[in-house]
Amino acid sequence: MSANDHGVATRVVERDAPAAAGGADAGHAATFASTEHFNLQTARALTVSESNGRASIYLAALSSNLIALAFIGQMSRLGAAFYAFALILLPVLGFVGLVTFVRLVQSSIEDIAYAHRIALLRDLYLRLSPELEPYVLAVRGSRALALGESLAPGAWQLTLTTAGMVAVVNSVVVAAVAGLALAAAGVDPLGLPLGFAAVVGAGALALHQRHHRRARDAYTPEGVDRAAIFIPPSPQADTA
């Protein structure tokens, strides 16, 4: 090979080297993104599994406690033993329902954060391979804002969630505690304990929904990320 030919070959290699390096970097980025996508999908599945498990445990405890109350009521003929047992058992059940509801709200927000991060990875896929756009769902710009506004959940939609369902059931438990407390105190007629229980139950449900809305409105992906994927400083950085 002549010196001229060698120079031409060298210039061709130097010209193609950045493109090859860019292709390698894009391949590494796609590999990392797909791995992160899998991890996020696994995390979303865990939030759904935990939510279903917690709700099932609460409803199973409620069912078993109601059966126990029925036996006690039958044996004591709705006497003092029944009221004492109910006023000890139901407040504990209400506490279990409250912490279950709060955790379900947290899990739902974590699920939203993971979905947001998966959407960011989809955008990265389309930047690396624009030819995938007909096959990958991605909504950008003003259309994304309009779609996000139209999908903002209302009060009824929040009630349809697992956390909303537990909020309704737990509000009924709180109302039952209030009504039984008045009935045990000998308040007559029966309409007064029932009316008081209805008011307390409605207030409890309003407080549950208020917490749910405030948690939803205060949600930011960055805030969830700081709690879920916070990266502590490495020991090497501390010793440096």
Image (cartoon, rainbow, N blue to C red):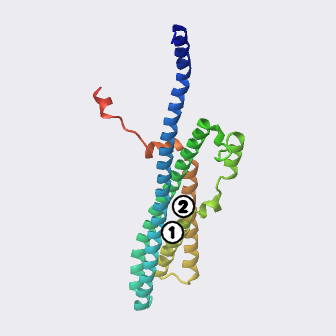
Q: Is residue 92 left or right of residue 45?
A: left
Q: Residues within 10 Å of mark 1 (few under 14, many from 20)?
A: many
Disc marking residue 170: 1
- List x then y, in percent, for residue 140: 67, 41
Residue at coordinates 53% horizontally, 62% vertically from top-left? 163
Q: Is residue 158 above or below residue 230?
A: below
Residue 130 figure quarter: top right
Disc marking residue 220: none
Disc marking residue 208: 2
- List x then y, in percent, for residue 74: 43, 90
- List x then y, in percent, for residue 221: 53, 44
The C terminus, quarter of image? top left
Residue at coordinates 56% horizontally, 83% vertically from top-left? 190
Q: Is residue 106 above or below residue 129?
A: below
- List x then y, in percent, for residue 212: 55, 56
Q: Amino acid at mark 2?
A: His
Residue at coordinates 49% horizontally, 56% vertically from top-left? 107
Q: Is residue 212 above or below residue 27?
A: below
Q: Nearer the viewer, residue 96 or 117?
A: 117
Residue at coordinates 43% horizontally, 66% vertically from top-left? 96
